[in-house]
Image (cartoon, grey):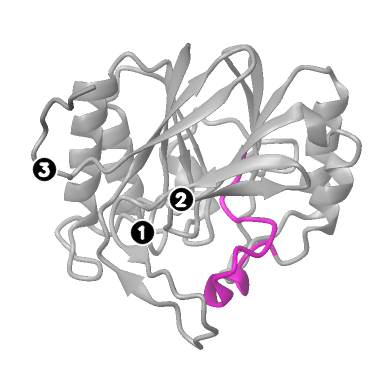
Amino acid sequence: MFKFIHITDTHLVAQGQALYGLDPYRRLARCIDSVIAEHGDAALCVVTGDLADTGHPDAYRQLAQQLGRLPMPVFPILGNHDSRERFRAHFPQVPVDANGFVQYEVAIGGYRGLFLDTNEPGVSHGVLCEQRAQWLAERLAQSDEPVLLFMHHPAFALGIPSMDRIALLDPAPLRRALQGQEQRIRHLFFGHVHRPIFGSWLGIPYSTLRGTNHQVALRLDDTPKIGGSHEPPQYGVVLLGEETVTVHVHDFLDRSERFWLGE
């Protein structure tokens, strides 16, 4: 099987600063340590946004330093906490589309990986404007290969009202781009929600994970604020087969006892 790593919501800040009582840089470093030690044979790594917490230039320097330790190519995209300008200054090798959005295509095993940019400066919700959606529609029209789709914001409600309010603001352009192509989208990977959630949308299977620093609490009531928690951080280990997409979730700081089970 073809293996790749999914990391999301690293929320790096200026070096030495804390975020919600934790050190995001140290947490990411331990995540990278785990990937190298346990899944260094993965073919690539994707990072689905909120790379920085406030778009601080030092956050992107730290991110480049840590991701550079991985023995595999890394493909990041932007989240609502990111600065497109500062990200591009530190990651000039990451492609952009004709309009300057961080959108690009990568071959992932026997699949086409399409990476979307839902960042809109100054707001927390996601935006996929007509220009960005047109880029997606054009890529989908180029072949009939199966597709893996990567974005930061979910395009639909997940039942956590405080987060649903800051999902993709208007999913209509995305839905139009996908119309008639839904069966080709074998999996949708996103971030933003800081929770392990799995399901389907328009018949498209999806998954998202906890971040590497802080998490969103599982509150299905309609609170005015977003609840936080210090549940264990995660990354995903994705295995691709000709007919399967399997997502394993790894709590990389878990140090509970390991033992052999009886049959």
Q: Amino acid at mark 2?
A: Arg
Q: Vertical placement of 36 versus 228: above or below?
A: above
Q: How many marks?
A: 3
Q: Earlier in the sequence, mark 3 or mark 1?
A: 1
Q: Vertical placement of 72 versus 213: above or below?
A: above
| Camera-nearest label, 2 or 3 | 3
Q: Residues within 10 Å of mark 1 (few under 14, many from 20)?
A: some
Is 149 in front, or is 260?
260
Q: Judging from the image, what secondary structure is the residue with disc 3 in?
A: loop
Q: Vertical placement of 102 versus 123: above or below?
A: above
Q: Residue 98's quadrant in the figure?
A: top right
Q: Residue at x 16, y 48 (%)?
A: 26
Residue 157 is inside the magenta segment: yes
Query: What span is colored magenta in the figure?
Result: 150-168
Tell me the CA gap for discs 2 and 1.
Answer: 8 Å
Q: Residue at x 71, y 67 (%)?
A: 169
- According to the picture, the residue beneath numbered tag 2 turns out to be 86
Q: Residue at x 65, y 40 (%)?
A: 205
Mark drawn on residue 110: none
| Camera-nearest label, 3 or 1 | 3
Q: Position of residue 53 (x, y in %)?
A: 38, 61
Q: Earlier in the sequence, mark 2 or mark 1?
A: 1
Q: Judging from the image, what secondary structure is the residue with disc 2 in?
A: helix
Q: Amino acid at mark 3?
A: Arg
Answer left or right for 135 relative to 14. Answer: right
- According to the picture, the residue beneath numbered tag 1 turns out to be 56
Tell me the CA gap for discs 2 and 3.
Answer: 36 Å
Answer left or right for 61 relative to 176. Answer: left
Is there CB contact under 8 Å for labels 2 and 3? no
Residue 210 is inside the magenta segment: no
Mark drawn on residue 255: 3
